Image (cartoon, rainbow, N blue to C red):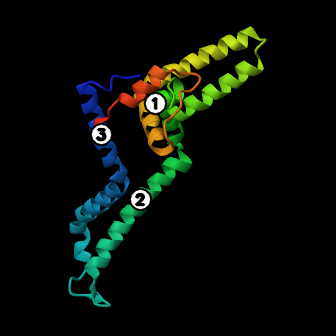
């Protein structure tokens, strides 16, 4: 489940949260930086074509030249994006690798999927009570779900459910100790 309670784990989590925050603006900021940098790098090579004294509607042609270069760079970036998406389809392989490396797709569960999986396993177990093989498999799945109630994500969910909906009941696939343990965990990033 991860050792997020250690001081090293807390620092790593804090650092990853800051990295995530930076990534949220990366697309817009990166596009603007690309545009302005390349525009200003190219300007000395084409500025001699523009008469600094000439204007159109009171705006110097220099600004039109800079805007044209910037627009060209933006078009180039969008063209690369179009080729990446529609011609080469590289994002499909990226998504495949992303899913392979995501523990919540391969072996771990989020609280909502834990609940859904446990509910389905319990329903199948009750409907196939005479099939020992199915009952054994569903017991294994319920045990798997119970183990996911010992992690940080489950604790965060229980604490949030307690606030939003009143005290969360002890579910059939877990026990009072796990539920209380989930309530007792304190998260420094929410203090």
What residue is at 50 percent from the left and 54 percent from the top? Answer: 82
Q: Earlier in the sequence, mark 1 or mark 3?
A: 1
Q: Earlier in the sequence, mark 2 or mark 1?
A: 2
Task: Give the crowd class for mark 3: few <14, some 14-19, many >=20 residues within 10 Å.
Answer: few
Q: CA distance from mark 1 to mark 3?
A: 16 Å
Q: Name, please, the residue furthest toward the bottom.
A: 57
Q: CA distance from mark 2 to mark 3?
A: 41 Å
Are the residues at dot 2 and dot 1 in contact (C-beta closer than 8 Å)?
A: no
Frontmost residue, 145 versus 186:
186
Above or below, comparing residue 24 to residue 107 in the picture: below
Q: Nearer the viewer, mark 2 or mark 1?
A: 1
Q: Earlier in the sequence, mark 2 or mark 3?
A: 2
Q: Position of residue 41 (x, y in %)?
A: 23, 61
What residue sits right under mark 2 in the picture?
76
What residue is at 53 percent from the left and 27 percent from the top? Answer: 170
Helix, strand or loop at label 2? It is helix
Q: Name, please, the residue furthest toward the right.
A: 130
Q: Quadrant of residue 121?
A: top right
Numbered tag placed on residue 189 in the rendering: 3
Q: Name, please, the residue furthest toward the front.
A: 166
Q: Quadrant of residue 184?
A: top left
Pick the quarter of the image with the N terminus.
Answer: top left
Task: Give the crowd class for mark 2: few <14, some 14-19, many >=20 residues within 10 Å.
Answer: few
Task: Give the crowd class for mark 1: few <14, some 14-19, many >=20 residues within 10 Å.
Answer: many
């Amino acid at each position: 489940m991860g050792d997020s309670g250690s001081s090293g784990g807390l620092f790593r989590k804090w650092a990853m949260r800051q990295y995530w925050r930076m990534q949220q603006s990366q697309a817009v900021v990166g596009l603007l930086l690309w545009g302005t940098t390349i525009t200003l790098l190219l300007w000395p090579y084409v500025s001699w074509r523009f008469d600094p004294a000439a204007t159109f509607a009171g705006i110097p042609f220099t600004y039109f030249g800079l805007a044209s270069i910037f627009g060209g760079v933006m078009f180039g970036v969008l063209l690369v994006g179009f080729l990446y998406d529609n011609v080469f389809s590289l994002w499909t392989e990226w998504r495949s690798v992303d899913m392979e490396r995501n523990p919540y797709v391969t072996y771990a569960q989020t609280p909502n999927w834990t609940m859904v999986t446990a509910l389905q396993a319990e329903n199948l177990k009750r409907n196939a009570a005479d099939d020992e093989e199915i009952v054994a498999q569903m017991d294994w799945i319920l045990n798997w779900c119970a183990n996911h109630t010992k992690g940080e994500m489950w604790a965060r969910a229980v604490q949030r459910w307690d606030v939003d909906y009143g005290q969360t009941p002890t579910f059939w696939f877990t026990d009072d100790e796990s539920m209380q343990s989930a309530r007792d965990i304190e998260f420094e990033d929410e203090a």
